[in-house]
Image: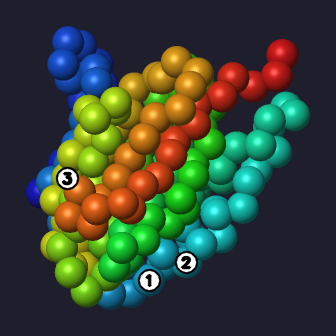
Amino acid sequence: MIGLKEPDNFDGEMAMLWSSSAMVRSAKGMATLVALAAMGLGAAQAEGVDFTAPVDPAAAVPTYAIELKDGELLPPTLVVPAKTRFRLHVTNTGTKPSEFESNQLRLEEVLFMGMEATMMVTPLDPGDYDYFDEFQPGVMGKLTAKEAAP
C-alpha cells in the first residue's frame, strides 16, 4: 500500500467514498496521530460557526481524526464544513477489534487492534450524520455538517 494515491477525479460510486485499506503504522506514528487528534478535540472558530479542528489545518483536504478505544468514540461529535470534501482518519487504539460504520455516509471499516484507516468523504449537505462501532452496541458518534456564516 505504500505509494497509494487518492484519485484526482471522483465519479459515480467513487464519489461517495475513497477508502484506503487499514494499515498498521509504527507505535511512534500512531502516538503522534493520537496526540494531534487530542489537540484537535477542541473547536476551531470559522466565520462564527464552531468547527472541529482538522489534524493538519494547512492541508489542501482537511483530515479529521476519530479514535476507537474499547467502547468509546473520540471525539463523540465532529463538526465539519458542509459542501467540503474531507478525510476521516480512524484509529483503533483499544485492546479489541472495532468496526467504524456509518450507513448515512456509506462508510465501513473493520479495524483490529493498532490499525488505522483513512476514508474520503465527499461534500455533504448540512445536517447530522451518525457513525458507530458496530462491534460495541450503543457506542455512537455524530458528524454535523454546517455551513459557514456568510
Pointers 2 and 3 in contact (C-beta within 8 Å): no
Pointers 1 and 2 in contact (C-beta within 8 Å): yes
Q: Residues within 10 Å of mark 3 (few under 14, many from 20)?
A: many
Q: Is residue 30 left or right of residue 114?
A: right
Which residue is drawn at the image coordinates 76% and 50% (left, top)?
Answer: 44
- For label 3, the residue is 109
Pointers 3 and 1 in contact (C-beta within 8 Å): no
- For label 1, the residue is 31
The dot on residue 41 is: none
Q: Nearer the viewer, mark 2 or mark 3?
A: 3
Q: Is residue 112 left or right of residue 52?
A: left
Examine the rendered structure and indicate whether residue 22 appears above or below residue 114: above
Q: CA distance from mark 2 to mark 3?
A: 22 Å
What x and y, as percent, mark residue 121? Answer: 38, 33
Identify which amino acid the numbered label 1 is placed on: Ala
The dot on residue 35 is: 2
Identify which amino acid the numbered label 3 is placed on: Glu
